[in-house]
Image (cartoon, helix red, strand yellow):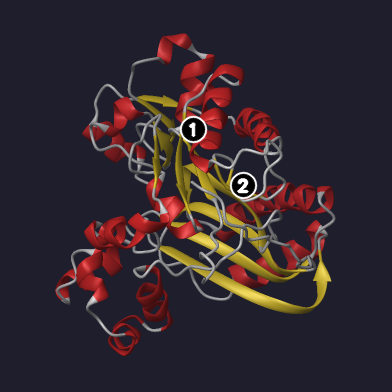
């Protein structure tokens, strides 16, 4: 007799409108109302929107001006990242009571490999349900979950029954699930790629599956091979219980646009001070300094320089940033400046994933 195939059991937990939900939880006056975290009537970008605001088309990454246009009743709230981190830490403590294989993607979402878990429960679906209930009871927020055999499908599934729901895609359902899925729902297929796929007659997973790997690589480069595999349910990326920091950054959006490099340098010194604190707190240094500039027309530019040695001191960072600032003339007034350090001294560690066969 041939052995049955072995599958990993992956849960993707995604908090529902996390930043906005925290604000509504902490301030009852905001509950049931359209809330935008970040941005303002005049400036800035929305970091998160409540479900009440999303009904009007308010989304993260749009300008506060646009959010106000879409929803005149929108309430803007300043982000409180220390509070979000505090809540996130509580949620992750719950995750670790079930498995040590937890891979955070951000403060509000994470992958959990529960193939082997601390509860000895063979059902990933029941574990996801229990985790979501505990988050609700112990933290006060709702979460959604996707459950399947790999990270790609679990990530997509967590969005199916949002908010406060979950979706399990069992091994024998994977191919039909992916074939019926609109191409814009595929994780990793953004707005530009979606439009390109539409032009090629690819509207669903079934359409994508008809294309050869050579065809997809011709039109999408290296990503073509990724699309060819994932639509067939092939995605072997492991849940890693660590996150290698690739860059550390600090930035600031100004209330009034800056038009003088002298004023910009003053602000960059403050930003470099903030960046230095983050670097030294985590004992990180890097070789590549990048200056981020966002102009008043919202166009963005980056300028980078890679040094021969690792740095973390504000003075060395600022020295390089000043050189980048004067590298070429500003094309317009500036609304945002940022500094990031990459090519870091962090090292990648190995993670072990055990694959066993269990019933979903």
Query: 124 or 110, which lies in front?
Result: 124
Residue 58, label in figure: none
Look at the numbered disc 1 and give the secondary structure of its residue: helix
Q: Nearer the viewer, residue 257 or 204?
A: 204
In the rendered structure, the answer to whether residue 293 lies left or right of residue 73 reads: right
Q: Residue at x 31, y 82 (%)?
A: 216
Residue beneath label 2, please?
A: 114
Percent across and percent down for residue 360 are 48, 46
Distance from disc 1 to disc 2, alpha carbons, whole Å, reads: 24 Å
Figure disc tally: 2
- For image coordinates 71% across by 35% down, the residue present is 97
Which quadrant of the figure has residue 264? Answer: bottom right
Q: Secondary structure at mark 2?
A: loop
Left or right side of 343 for 228: left
Task: Identify which residue, 18 or 354, lies in the foreground.
Answer: 354
Q: Position of residue 133 (x, y in %)?
A: 53, 24
Image quadrant where residue 215 sits: bottom left
The mark nearer the N terminus, 1 or 2, is: 1
Circle 2 residues within 10 Å: few <14, some 14–19, many ≥20: many
Q: Residues within 10 Å of mark 1 (few under 14, many from 20)?
A: many
Residue 18's tag is 1
């Amino acid at each position: 007799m041939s052995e049955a195939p072995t599958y990993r059991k992956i849960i993707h937990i995604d908090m529902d409108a996390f930043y906005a939900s925290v604000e509504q939880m902490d301030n009852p006056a905001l509950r049931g109302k359209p809330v935008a975290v970040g941005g303002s009537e005049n400036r800035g970008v929305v970091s998160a929107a409540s479900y009440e605001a999303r009904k009007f088309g308010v989304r993260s990454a749009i300008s506060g001006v646009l959010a106000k246009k879409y929803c005149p009743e929108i309430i803007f709230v300043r982000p409180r990242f220390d509070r979000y981190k505090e809540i996130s830490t509580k949620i992750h403590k719950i995750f670790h009571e079930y498995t040590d294989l937890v891979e955070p993607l951000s403060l509000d979402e994470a992958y959990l490999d529960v193939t082997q878990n601390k509860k000895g429960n063979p059902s990933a679906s029941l574990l996801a349900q229990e985790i979501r209930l505990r988050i609700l009871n112990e933290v006060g927020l709702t979460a959604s979950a996707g459950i399947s055999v790999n990270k790609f499908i679990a990530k997509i599934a967590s969005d199916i029954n949002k908010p406060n729901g979950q979706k399990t895609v069992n091994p024998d359902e994977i191919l039909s699930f992916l074939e019926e899925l609109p191409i814009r729902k595929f994780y990793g297929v953004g707005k530009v790629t979606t439009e390109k796929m539409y032009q090629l007659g690819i509207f669903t997973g079934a359409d994508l599956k008809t294309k050869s790997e050579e065809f997809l690589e011709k039109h999408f480069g290296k990503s073509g091979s990724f699309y060819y595999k994932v639509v067939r349910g092939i995605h072997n990326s492991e849940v890693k219980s660590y996150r290698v920091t690739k860059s550390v950054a600090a930035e600031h959006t100004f209330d009034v646009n800056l038009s003088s490099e002298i004023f910009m340098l003053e602000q960059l010194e403050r930003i470099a001070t903030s960046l230095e604190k983050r670097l030294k707190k985590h004992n990180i240094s890097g070789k590549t300094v990048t200056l981020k500039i966002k102009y008043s027309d919202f166009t963005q530019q980056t300028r980078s320089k890679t040094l021969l040695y690792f740095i973390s001191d504000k003075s060395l960072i600022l020295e390089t940033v000043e050189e980048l600032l004067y590298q070429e003339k500003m094309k317009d007034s500036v609304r945002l400046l940022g500094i990031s350090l990459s090519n870091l001294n962090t090292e990648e560690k190995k993670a072990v994933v055990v694959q066993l066969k269990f019933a979903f």
